[in-house]
Image: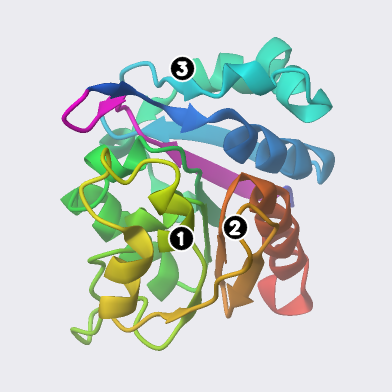
Amino acid sequence: MKRKILIIVSNANVIGPNNRRTGTFLPEVAHPYAEFDRANYEVDFASLTGDTPYLDALNLAGDPDNLAFLTGRGWAAMQKAVKLSEVDVSSYDAVFVPGGLAPMVDMPDNPLIKKVIKETNERNAVVGAVCHGPVSLLNVKLSDGTYLVNGRSIASFTDEEEENYAKTDVPFFLQTALTKQGAIFHAAAPWTANSIADGKIVTGQNPASAKGVAEKMIVILESPESL
């Protein structure tokens, strides 16, 4: 049976006191989409409000997978993202949250995405996120009252990377916040590929890590225990 992936994207397009333009970072959605598509998975999009999401880093459109996303089915589907509250997330084998600065605006405390991540994890489906996307894992409490990330190996955009990218725009540093909730944080050199799977939670550090997150999610989904 064909696997089903739900990509959940932010609806934010500005961040911080200077109203920096933002959105979903193109390669962080396009590269995973390409991997899922090559695996012949069914890929759907949802956003928090159901409004048309925004893309950032369109200057990277020359990359083959980015260009294929923009000119093919990917961007067309993302523009028609369904409101998350109207999606039966339990019908999906995995959820994936791409980054860009946008999730730092509308995902840190959104109760619905916290519920979706909690329930996806507790029904033993796969949860993936990359760069700033792991903010969706922040503040998620499991049924036993513990934080989802507590004691789990996690990667995200690092404090070192943020210092030279958006420290005056983001409301907090994601690495620090995840670590405070008990995450065992795995950081690589800035802007290098770094993805990690801990059980069925897969996270990545930055845009270069997006492909690796999708590949690890696919390995889990294709494993005998996931059949």
Give the camera-side residue of 164 and 170: 164
- The part of the chain drawn in magenta is 3-18
Res. 157 in view:
no
Cβ atoms at labels 1 and 2 below 8 Å apart: yes
Q: How crowded is the residue under tag 3: few (<14 C-alpha within 10 Å), some, or many (20+)?
A: some
Q: Which residue is mark 2?
A: 190
Query: Mark 3 against mark 2, which lies toward the viewer?
Result: 2
Distance (Cα) linking label 1 and label 2: 7 Å
Q: Is residue 112 above or below residue 200?
A: above
In the rendered structure, the answer to whether residue 59 lies left or right of residue 227 reads: left
Check the picture and name the quadrant holding the C terminus.
bottom right
Distance (Cα) linking label 3 and label 2: 34 Å
Tag 1 secondary structure: helix
Kindly identify the amino acid type of the residue bearing the numbered disc 2. Answer: Pro
Q: Which residue is mark 3?
A: 80
Tag 3 secondary structure: loop
- Identify which residue is drawn at 39% across, 80% down: 183
Distance (Cα) linking label 3 and label 1: 35 Å
Q: Which residue is mark 1?
A: 160
Kindly identify the amino acid type of the residue bearing the numbered disc 3. Answer: Lys
Determine which quarter of the picture holds residue 220.
Answer: bottom right
Q: Is residue 190 above or below residue 5?
A: below
Res. 208 in view:
yes
